[in-house]
Image: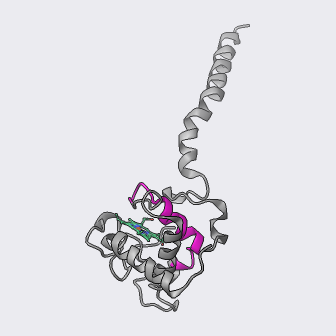
Amino acid sequence: MKAEPRTRILLIAAVAWALFAPLTTAGHVEEQTPGRAEGWLIPETAATERSPVPVTAAMIEKGKSFYLSKCRRCHGQDGTGRGPDADPAHAPSDLTDARRASRNPDGVMFYKIWNGRANPRMPAMKSEISQADVWAIVSYIKTLRNQGPLQDKAPGGSHRRR
Ligand code: HEC
């Protein structure tokens, strides 16, 4: 009988934990769900998605003009991430890096551009241009990529993040 109040307290604590733990973890789930790596909002199916718009020279030209007006200020004319608005503390990804490119299938890039991200900040395009125009940008930025894996980049450069 002596142990009973203590047991009761433990029981209350356990019940309280069971009730509130899901609420407190819910906020973290938001950031840690797979497919939302580091704040990008990327659906599970993204990696297999391809442009529904036929990729033509004209489409790539259109993508280029959007790139120059919307992306150059951070990613730079050549895509290496040295635009005038680039944040030195959170450099925009080097879009020419062949190793990074292999981790960014078309659909993944589409959603990165479409949804943007909060921190480090990249503006979402979904409120500015159409999906077809974002696919045009995806096609254009692929032309900025270095082709071979033997690019002479600093080993383990600043763009290791996924
Ligand atoms: C305000 C500056 C800014 C603008 C404008 C901007 N970006 Fe970015 N972008 C960033 C930053 C910062 C990152 C890196 C985020 C990180 O650390 O993962 C990034 C990352 C990316 C990535 C991911 C690359 C990778 O290897 O993961 C792509 C693709 C991209 N940007 C394309 C674009 C395109 C296309 C546009 C124009 C429609 C654009 N960005 C406009 C700042 C910007």
Q: Is residue 84 left or right of residue 5?
A: left
User: Residue 16 at what x, y percent from top left?
Assistant: 62, 23
Report the colour scheme.
one colour
Residue shown at 52% from the left, 89% from the top: 149
Residue shown at 33% from the left, 70% from the top: 74
Position of the N terminus, as image quadrant, is top right
Above or below residue 75? Residue 16 is: above
Above or below residue 7? Residue 132 is: below
User: Residue 101 at what x, y percent from top left?
Assistant: 52, 79
Q: Is residue 54 left or right of residue 93?
A: right
Q: Is residue 152 left or right of residue 105?
A: left
Above or below residue 144? Residue 129 is: above
Residue 43 visible within the image: yes
Residue shown at 66% from the left, 23% from the top: 15
Q: Which region is colored magenta?
A: 101-121
In magenta segment, residue 116: yes
Above or below residue 104? Residue 24 is: above
- Residue 11 falls in which quadrant of the image? top right
Q: Quadrant of ligand 1?
A: bottom left
Q: Nearer the viewer, residue 74 or 93?
A: 74
Q: Residue lying farthest left?
A: 84
Q: Nearer the viewer, residue 143 or 61?
A: 61
In magenta segment, residue 127: no
- Residue 93 falls in which quadrant of the image? bottom left
Q: Residue lying farthest right?
A: 1
Q: Is residue 58 left or right of residue 67?
A: right
Q: Nearer the viewer, residue 124 or 98?
A: 124
User: Residue 160 at what x, y percent from top left?
Assistant: 47, 72
Residue 142 visible within the image: no
Residue shown at 64% from the left, 70% from the top: 49
Q: Residue lying farthest top?
A: 1
